[in-house]
Structures are given as structure tokens and as C-alpha cells.
């Protein structure tokens, strides 16, 4: 009997527990679903959490964009070209030579060329003209500068008239003629000496040399020999005369002494 009462008690307890569990489940199923609670905010110190913007600052307008840099100043304008010079009249280009009493020199006018030298001769001169070449100590016609321009002028006329003459041949020939004239002129200072070149020379019909002072009187001897000033006068053959005009058939070749000396001494050379 006691065992039956124990069994009956356990069954009763089990029934009560089961009934309450079922009632609790039915109650929860009947309630509406609840919103989940938001997660707790993270600390600002958390590196993954950024601080929220201030409400007041978010209402301000954005800052204006930076202004562009001022434009660079324009480059300076080039200087104006120099004024065109009016050609001088021949009278204004006449020079009195202090070393030669009563002697004047009249210069030709402008070249009217973009470069190079003023033409050495006038195409239609009204009188006989002797153009002066600033020579070299080696006594040849050629090279550069004015001396080279003389060589170019003579060679151009020779080519027009079918004369075969090269730059080198003219240089060597003129050097040989003028060295021979210098040897003669040194022996007779103050006198004009002549060398007959008409037969052997393709360029010179007649040639003259002049040394004004005795060698060694004012300048010491140089490495090349007698240190004197010398002037050569050449009568050109018609085949090499500039523009074929006989008033252009004279050229002068001058070389000054080598060394320092007063102007009065150079005027005697």
C-alpha cells in the first residue's frame, strides 16, 4: 500500500510540473515579438569608433575653395630696333691726314649689303682709284679679313675671263713677288723700286715697292728680317681688273712695322 501511495505521489507531481511548463509555453507564444535591445555603445577610445560630428558644425556652409594664384606678369617687350642711320655724305667722310701735309682721304659710302665688306671698287668710277689692302707680315694676298676680300675679288674677275687661278696659287704668287720687291726696296730706302712682272705674272702688269726709312733705324730687326714698313703698288692686268673698268686697275698693299713706337714714328714708316 505504501508503494502505491509513493507512485501516486510522483505521478501527481509530474502532472503538475508538466501542466505549468505547457502553460508557460502557451503564454510566451501568445505574446507579440519584442524588439531586440540595441547593443551597448562602444567607447570612444575604441580605434574602430569615430566621434560623432558636432550638430552645430554640420550646419555651417563648407569653406570656399582656395583662390587661384595670380597670373604671372607678361615677359618684358624686346627693345625697339635702333633707328636706321642716314648714309653720310662723302664730304662728311673726308679725313685730313696729319702725317701727310695737304693730303685728304675720302671714304666710300655704306655697303648696302647685309654682311661682308663695302665693295672694294666702284663699278663705274669717274677717276682712277687705288684701293688699299691691309696686308700681312708674310706678304701674301689672301687669308681672312680685307686681305681675303681682295683675293676673292681678283679670283672672281679671273674666272669671268677664263683665267685658271686658285686661291692657293694667288697667295703663293703674290707672296713671291712682294718678297722680291721688299728685298729691292730695303736696299734703296726712300725710293720707289719696280719689278717687271708683266710677262710671268697672271695678275700684275707692273709692280712697285717702297720702304721709307732705313731698316733698324727706328725698329729692331724682327724674326722675319728687316723690320720696316713697306707699301706695294700693283697695276692689275685687264683680265683681273674689277668690273673690267681700267680706272680700277690699281691696288696698294701696305704692312706696318712690328713693334711699339710713337705715332710720329709710325707716320714716317
Image (cartoon, rainbow, N blue to C red):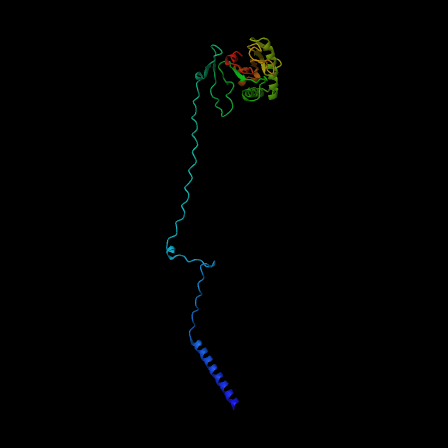
Question: In the image, is 255 to the left or to the right of 68?
Answer: right
Up/down of 70 relative to 45, above or below: above
Asked whether the viewer can see residue 198, the reply is no
Along the viewing direction, whichever of 211 and 240 lies nearer the viewer = 211
Question: In the image, is 237 to the left or to the right of 70?
Answer: right
Q: Residue at x 45, y 15 (%)?
A: 94
Q: How many marks?
A: 0
Name the spot of residue 6 as percent of width and height, x first.
51, 87
- Name, please, the residue furthest toward the bottom: 1
Asked whether the viewer can see residue 9, the reply is yes
- Name, please, the residue furthest toward the right: 200
Q: Residue at x 49, y 86 (%)?
A: 9
Along the viewing direction, whichever of 155 and 94 lies nearer the viewer = 94
Q: Quadrant of the C terminus?
A: top right
Name the spot of residue 100 as percent of width and height, x first.
49, 11
| Quadrant position of residue 184 | top right
Name the spot of residue 267 as percent of width and height, x first.
51, 12
Along the viewing direction, whichever of 188 and 56 lies nearer the viewer = 56
Up/down of 31 relative to 187, above or below: below
Up/down of 137 relative to 35, above or below: above
Name the spot of residue 265 as percent of width and height, x first.
52, 12
| Quadrant position of residue 154 | top right
Amino acid at each position: 500500500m505504501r508503494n502505491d501511495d509513493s507512485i501516486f505521489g510522483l505521478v501527481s507531481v509530474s502532472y503538475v510540473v508538466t501542466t505549468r511548463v505547457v502553460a508557460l509555453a502557451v503564454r510566451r507564444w501568445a505574446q507579440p515579438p519584442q524588439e531586440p535591445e540595441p547593443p551597448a555603445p562602444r567607447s570612444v577610445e575604441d580605434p574602430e569608433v569615430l566621434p560623432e560630428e558636432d550638430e552645430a558644425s554640420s550646419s555651417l556652409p563648407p569653406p570656399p575653395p582656395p583662390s587661384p594664384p595670380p597670373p604671372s606678369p607678361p615677359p618684358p617687350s624686346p627693345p625697339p630696333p635702333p633707328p636706321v642711320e642716314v648714309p653720310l655724305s662723302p664730304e662728311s667722310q673726308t679725313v685730313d691726314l696729319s702725317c701727310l701735309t695737304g693730303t685728304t682721304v675720302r671714304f666710300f659710302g655704306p655697303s648696302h649689303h647685309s654682311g661682308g665688306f663695302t665693295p672694294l671698287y666702284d663699278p663705274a668710277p669717274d677717276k682712277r682709284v687705288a684701293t688699299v689692302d691691309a696686308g700681312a707680315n708674310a706678304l701674301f694676298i689672301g687669308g681672312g679679313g680685307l686681305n681675303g676680300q681682295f683675293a676673292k675679288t681678283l679670283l672672281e674677275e679671273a674666272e669671268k675671263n677664263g683665267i685658271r687661278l686658285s686661291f692657293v696659287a694667288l697667295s703663293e704668287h703674290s707672296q713671291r713677288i712682294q718678297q722680291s720687291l721688299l728685298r729691292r726696296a730695303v736696299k734703296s730706302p726712300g725710293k720707289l723700286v719696280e719689278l717687271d712682272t708683266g710677262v710671268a705674272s697672271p695678275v700684275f702688269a707692273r709692280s712697285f715697292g717702297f720702304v721709307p726709312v732705313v731698316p733698324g733705324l727706328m725698329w729692331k730687326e724682327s724674326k722675319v728680317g728687316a723690320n720696316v714698313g713697306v707699301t706695294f703698288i700693283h697695276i692689275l692686268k685687264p683680265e683681273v681688273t674689277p668690273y673690267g673698268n681700267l680706272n680700277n686697275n690699281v691696288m696698294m698693299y701696305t704692312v706696318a712695322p712690328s713693334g711699339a713706337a710713337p705715332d710720329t714714328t709710325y707716320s714716317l714708316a
